[in-house]
Image (tube, rainbow, N blue to C red):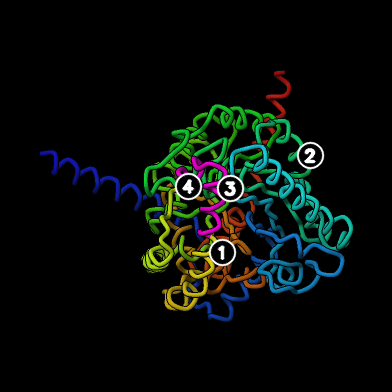
Amino acid sequence: MKHYLNKKLLIISMLLCFLVACSDNENRNLTPATETKAELIARARGIHERIITLDTHADINTTNFTATRNYTQDLDTQVNLPKMEAGGLDVAWFIVYTGQGALDDEGYAAAYANAIDKFDAIHRLVEEIAPDQIEIAYNSADVKRIDAAGKKVAMIGIENAYPVGLDLSRIEEFHQRGGRYMSLAHNGHSQFSDSHTGETDNDYMHEGLSDIGREAIAEMNRLGIMVDISHPSKDSIMQTIELSRAPVIASHSAARAVTNHTRNLDDEMLLAVQENGGVVQTTAFSSYVSEARRAFLAEGRNRLETEIAESLGFEILTPAAVERLSASDRASYDETYAELNSQLSPRLRTEVNAQAPTATVSDFIDHIDYIVALIGLEHVGISSDFDGGGGIEGWNDASESFNVTLELVRRNYTEEQIGQLWSGNLLRVLDEVQNFATEIQEEE
């Protein structure tokens, strides 16, 4: 009887997903039967030019933000102004990213200095290097005004709240510097939150959010900073969604049901985002959108890591175990791990990455289709993770952004829906988060 009921529930669930997908399809303009390939491309080009295209995740290296080397030049970066212009990408969220380090005063100080360096670099680009070409937006009205003026738009996201240290006043400082979203963890547990990296070994520090992490969410709500759930653990994500008074975002994640990566959101998390009113910025990161590629890369990396670690007599620890090491043991561990990586990187490129199945724009849009069918189009957006590992065949830098719109047109999304996916949904959430902040401040 139990098996029969489970099978019946599965059939009902599949029917519901099918009905949602059908409902969305009814709202799409079907491609005219007589439309040629050239006409479809021309129609897609018109849509791409009329809408505002926005990518929520582009990493930066501050060496590319100097007077002599900067984004006015077509550098070997995936994002820069010439590539944005060529691909019709209007808005790039430049990321103040900090890798996870030691949870002590020295670690916090180094992380803070790194964050300030990146904030300063972004402001230098828009205020000193190319003010006639790009401007920072702090809200949706700024985005529309700057775009209408013919400039590119820069926005700022903060990947990992680690640089805040234990001083929550820094969250307001980061907001004043232009930060409009922030994640509480990256690859490694922070003082605020567990990371998705604990999932493999079920090795966590806080069982979700820490007490100061809960305080940080309240402060972000008060200031109007979107809470980004892309890197924390599932428990942290679910606790964040329950706690936050404002909608949340996943700045660069895809669907776990389509590609089984710990960085992707499972159906329970996706449905929680829907209930919260937030948005999932589906990301074009190859191993997050292609299951065949993910499995191939994971197996190859594990095999090479094990082989090299054995040759070095080295035991690879979990992130939480590393954080429990003494300062001297941590330094020794880091030194040997660096040696492991120096041997691993070239072999990964030649023995694994070069042989792996490719991920394509079609694979990427499969994730968008899945999430749209599950939680509704108004909760889905687009991101690349360019210059941070992102990129797929067909959208490997900002100059190829049109190919995303083209594939959406091929799948019969309307111009209005494509505009929502590219920017409308994210800007709607930003508006709501900032409106909640105004309400909260009025309560004080």
Q: Which residue is mark 3?
A: 100
Q: As displayed, is residue 433 above or below residue 328?
A: above
Which of the two labelled residues, at mark 1 and mark 3, occupies the earlier sequence position? Answer: 3
Residue that sits furthest to the left in the current view: 1
Q: As displayed, is residue 319 above or below residue 84?
A: above
- Marks 2 and 3 close (CB-CB < 8 Å): no
**Residue 4 lies within the magenta run:** no
Mark 2–mark 3 distance (CA, rounded to whole Å)? 23 Å
Q: Position of residue 364 (x, y in %)?
A: 49, 64
Which of the two labelled residues, at mark 4 and mark 1, occupies the earlier sequence position? Answer: 4
Write down the quadrant of residue 81 in the picture: bottom right
Q: Amino acid at mark 4?
A: Pro
* Mark 2 neighbour class, 10 Å CA radius: few under 14, some 14 to 19, many 20 or more: few
**What numbered label is drawn on residue 176?**
2
Element under disc 1: loop
Element under disc 3: loop
Q: Which residue is mark 1?
A: 390
On-image quarter of the C terminus: top right
Mark 4–mark 1 distance (CA, rounded to whole Å)? 23 Å
On-image quarter of the N terminus: top left
Mark 1–mark 2 distance (CA, rounded to whole Å)? 28 Å
Q: Amino acid at mark 3?
A: Gln
Residue 177 located left or right of residue 394: right
Q: Which residue is mark 4?
A: 319
Q: Position of residue 404 (x, y in %)?
A: 57, 67
Mark 4–mark 3 distance (CA, rounded to whole Å)? 10 Å
- Marks 1 and 3 close (CB-CB < 8 Å): no
User: How many numbered marks does the figure carry?
Assistant: 4
Which of the two labelled residues, at mark 4 and mark 3, occupies the earlier sequence position? Answer: 3
Is residue 379 among what the camera can see?
no
Q: Amino acid at mark 1?
A: Gly
